[in-house]
Image (spheres, rainbow, N blue to C red):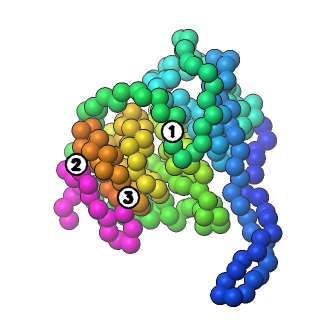
């Protein structure tokens, strides 16, 4: 299977303090991924064309089409922009969806309160800041283009995996798909995000089972309100050796 380039060159012009210059730059690629579920087209989504298997599986989980690893009987990636998933049981769904990357499909699946069992070890504030710094440091595509969001899974040793995409929801779904396919337990992990924590983001990580989210950006009031109910720790504006704690601080040490 051939891979697709996630960067493409283009000659552009820039204006700076009264003068123009021409130079070659790189722009992030935007393509459309087709997800085929049990032989039927489910969705076409704009995305960055890498790790599309994880994106497709994460999307199916986030939107409630699958709930357990055993729900999947086969996954085929015949092309980076075509992922075919077969489930062990038939699934009914409406007409194919065309979605952008700024918000989820909005399936309206109720989010249950997760017990979020803890391993009785508090997270160090210094370590959380190290994890978010790793998210920034390893954001090579963002540094080149400024055109992607990043999401990662972290534990008390460091970053386990990170993914980029032109959409926040896609980047998160790639993380969720990765943890789903690798069957990684999440009770002692945290989700790291470069962008805003909106309620759709919060619901996705709640369904996956993350007990904590740490972002460089801000949460919305609704996201914090729902996180309070669901038992999820929300940390925002994590940058420059500081962060804001919005709810469920019992998982973070007071040092």
**Residue most toward the top?**
90
Q: Which mark is residue 104?
A: 1
Read off the residue under disc 3. Answer: 218
The foreground one among 149 and 5 is: 149
Q: Secondary structure at mark 1?
A: loop
Q: Residue at x 77, y 82 (%)?
A: 21
Of labels 1 and 2, earlier in sequence is 1
Q: Position of residue 58 (x, y in %)?
A: 52, 35
Q: Is residue 253 rendered magenta in the image? A: yes
Distance between mark 1 and mark 2 Cα atoms: 25 Å
Distance between mark 2 and mark 3 Cα atoms: 16 Å
Task: Identify whether 2 is placed above or below 129.
Answer: above
Distance between mark 1 and mark 3 Cα atoms: 18 Å
Q: Position of residue 115 (x, y in %)?
A: 25, 33
Callout count: 3
Decide: few, some or many residues near mark 1? Use Cα within 10 Å; few <14, some 14-19, many ≥20. some
Quadrant of the image for the C terminus?
bottom left
Read off the residue under disc 2. Answer: 248
Q: Residue at x 78, y 37 (%)?
A: 1
Magenta residues (range) = 237-255
- Residue 92 in sight in this render: yes
- Residue 205 in sight in this render: no
């Amino acid at each position: 299977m051939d891979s697709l380039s996630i960067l493409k060159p283009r000659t552009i012009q820039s204006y700076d303090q009264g003068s123009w210059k021409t130079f070659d730059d790189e722009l992030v690629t935007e393509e459309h991924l087709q997800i085929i579920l049990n032989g039927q087209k489910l969705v076409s989504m704009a995305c960055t064309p890498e790790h599309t298997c994880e994106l497709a599986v994460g999307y199916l989980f986030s939107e409630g089409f699958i709930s357990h690893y055993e729900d999947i009987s086969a996954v085929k990636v015949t092309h980076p922009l075509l992922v075919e998933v077969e489930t062990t049981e038939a699934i009914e769904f409406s007409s194919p969806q065309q979605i952008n990357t700024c918000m989820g499909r909005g399936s309206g699946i109720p989010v249950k309160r997760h017990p979020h069992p803890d391993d009785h070890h508090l997270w160090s504030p210094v370590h959380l800041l190290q994890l978010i710094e790793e998210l920034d440091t390893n954001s090579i595509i963002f540094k080149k283009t400024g055109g992607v969001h990043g999401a990662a899974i972290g534990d008390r040793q460091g970053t386990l995996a990170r993914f980029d995409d032109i959409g926040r929801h896609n980047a998160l779904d790639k993380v969720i798909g990765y943890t789903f396919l690798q069957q990684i337990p999440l009770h002692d992990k945290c989700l790291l995000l470069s962008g805003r924590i909106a309620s759709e983001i919060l619901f996705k990580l709640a369904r996956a089972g993350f007990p904590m989210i740490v972002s460089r950006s801000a949460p919305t009031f609704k996201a914090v309100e729902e996180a309070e109910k669901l038992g999820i720790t929300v940390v925002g504006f994590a940058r420059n050796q500081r962060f804001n704690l919005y709810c469920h601080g019992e998982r973070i040490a007071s040092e």
